[in-house]
Amino acid sequence: MIISVMNLKGGVGKSSISFQLAQFFKLKMITNDANTGIMNIKILKGNSSIEVNEDRLYDFGGFDDIRIHEVLASSNVVVVPTLYSRADLQNTVRTVRKVKKLNPEANIIVTINRVRSGDSKQLNSAKASLEKYIDFGVQYCQIRDSKVMLHSLDSGKSIFDIHKSSKLNRHVYTGIINDFYALIGHIEEFIDDGKN
Ligand SMILES: Nc1ncnc2c1ncn2[C@@H]1O[C@H](COP(=O)(O)OP(=O)(O)O)[C@@H](O)[C@H]1O
Ligand SMILES: [Mg+2]
């Protein structure tokens, strides 16, 4: 399985989400962004080529790097995190169109990140705006805003490990864990489809 996490814009949560998914699916995480704040991942130097391998998660920094085209073309799933602002959604339209052009078969999951907890208004309204400009099939899901995302990268522990580490954590982080399970559910559907 090859998952790419991509948006032409920075600061939307690509590296934070990548880290969780790589941990969950036990994929090696590879990035072209030297400033992810994550330890123990492979960082591609500016001039080195990208090897496309199975069982990888590629986290692509928010700039257009020509080397990522080949990886996108081979990805089973492309997760496109975005924030909710108008400018972010515009960049997301550009990103999704670009991914579709490079890989018409890719399963694209737009993930509205940092939404207010327990509120699907932002997801529904972002989806409605995006659907005006994206006329092919794309999945949508949301990840709420939670300080555990920063805590996870700081500690090098996935949010799944943090969640199960104490009774209190199981209580306070249930919401964001369920958001991630919804995203993971979409990914697993696509993976199962590929096998049948
Ligand atoms: N769901 C979230 N809740 C709270 N903070 C988040 C969330 N997702 C990302 N962040 C924070 O947003 C900032 C940018 O995230 P990052 O993953 O580095 O984005 P990118 O890789 O797209 O540049 C980081 O400080 C990160 O902790
Ligand atoms: Mg990043």
Image: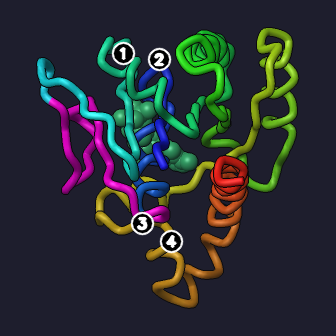
Q: Which mark is residue 160?
A: 4
Image-quarter location of ligand 2: top left
Which residue lies at the image location 13% right of the left edge and 28% below the top edge? 45
Q: Amino acid at mark 2?
A: Leu
Which residue lies at the image location 63% right of the left edge and 66% below the top edge? 177
Q: Residue furthest bottom?
A: 167
User: Are the residues tagged 2 and 1 within 8 Å (C-beta)?
Assistant: yes
Q: Amino acid at mark 1?
A: Phe
Q: Find disc 2 in the rendering and name its residue.
A: 8
Specify the quadrant of the image occupied by residue 89.
Answer: top right
Residue closer to the observer: 133 or 71:
71
Q: Find disc 1 in the rendering and name its residue.
A: 63
Indicate if the residue with disc 2 has its beta carbon within 8 Å of ligand 1.
Answer: no
How does the figure colour the protein chain or chains? Answer: rainbow
Q: Which mark is residue 158?
A: 3
Magenta stretch?
A: 24-44
Residue 23 in sight from this viewpoint: yes
Q: Say which label, 2 or 3, has the lower sequence index.
A: 2
Q: Which mark is residue 100?
A: none
User: Are the residues tagged 3 and 4 within 8 Å (C-beta)?
Assistant: yes
**Alpha carbons under labels 2 and 3: distance apart:** 25 Å
